[in-house]
Amino acid sequence: GRGVLPRAMAELGAYRCIECNGEATELYRDYQRGVLRISICKSCQKPVDKYIEYDPVIILINAVLCKAQAYRHILFNTKINIHGKLCVFCLLCEAYLRWLQLQDSSQNTDPDDLIRYAKEWDFYRMFGIASLEQTSFFIGIFITLWWMTPEMLKRKSDFILLLKALLLSTYGKLLLIPAVIWEHDYTPLCLAFIKVFVLISNSQAIRVTLNLNRILPWFAIFFGLIFENGVVCLFQKMGWDV
């Protein structure tokens, strides 16, 4: 069945063809009385965005499969503004996982209020560390891309779009919570798979946003990981408990 059409989709503006990444002025044309016709891309002669008729669940499944078409639909042809809230929630999930591992390593079961407050502070500290690591990771990516392809990041809007894409592509961290709740012998392996999945999503987001080949996004992610670990090591040498 036809899904919910994106709001303000009939307005003139710069949209993208999900197949060839070409620009389009509209995604569909409304002939009134419920008659809609999806626009055809002038470059590849395919529908500009077939996903405007798809159910959101199908779009989500395609995004989980890291299909470039689904990423283009979400980033360019919809009005999604949940990247900030999603980022905070993902960081909370990661902080909770680290805090839980920290509590498992502690043998102190004293119910004293002071101990309880200390444990609560540990959670906030884990949230701060997770935020620091993700910020460092993104900074490393931006530095690499700006150095390798400066023409791709000339305007402030280019940086904002890439940041939005990176924040949205970290949705895989939401899987950390069920991985911890359904704890079993393979939990460390599941966490490793989740980390790899998030990195793959980040790579696809960079590739789709800047229209790059497959190699450069992975190079940027590799440098981002190095920069992230470097910042953490620097703070540890400064005596910070990171």
Image (spheres, rainbow, N blue to C red):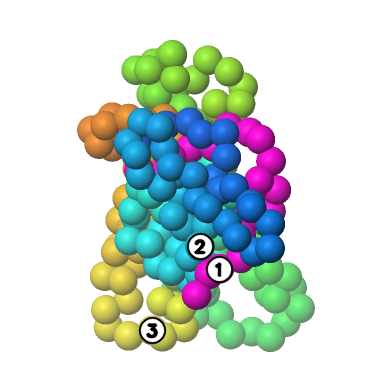
Give the secondary structure at mark 2.
Answer: helix
Q: Disc 1 marks which residue?
A: 3
Marks 1 and 2, the one that precedes in the sequence: 1
Above or below for 158 versus 187: above
Query: Which of 116/19 is in front?
Result: 19
Q: Which mark is residue 53?
A: 2
| CA–CA distance in space, label 3 to label 1 | 36 Å
Question: Among all residues in the image, which is located at the extreme left?
Answer: 215
Give the secondary structure at mark 3.
Answer: loop
Question: Among all residues in the image, which is located at the extreme right?
Answer: 113
- Indicate the amino acid at tag 2: Glu
Can residue 165 be seen? Answer: no
Q: Report the magenta residues as a range.
A: 1-19
Circles 1 and 2 in contact, beta carbons < 8 Å: yes
- Indicate the amino acid at tag 3: Glu
Q: Which residue is painted at 64% across and 84% down in the image?
A: 110
Marks 3 and 2, the one that precedes in the sequence: 2
Q: Residue 138: x percent and y percent?
A: 48, 36
Q: Is residue 177 left or right of residue 80?
A: left
| CA–CA distance in space, label 1 to label 2 | 5 Å
Which of the 4 quarters of the picture holds residue 12?
Answer: top right
Q: Nearer the viewer, mark 3 or mark 2?
A: 2
Q: Which residue is painted at 56% across and 48% down in the image?
A: 28
Q: Disc 3 marks which residue?
A: 183
Q: Residue 177: x percent and y percent?
A: 49, 74
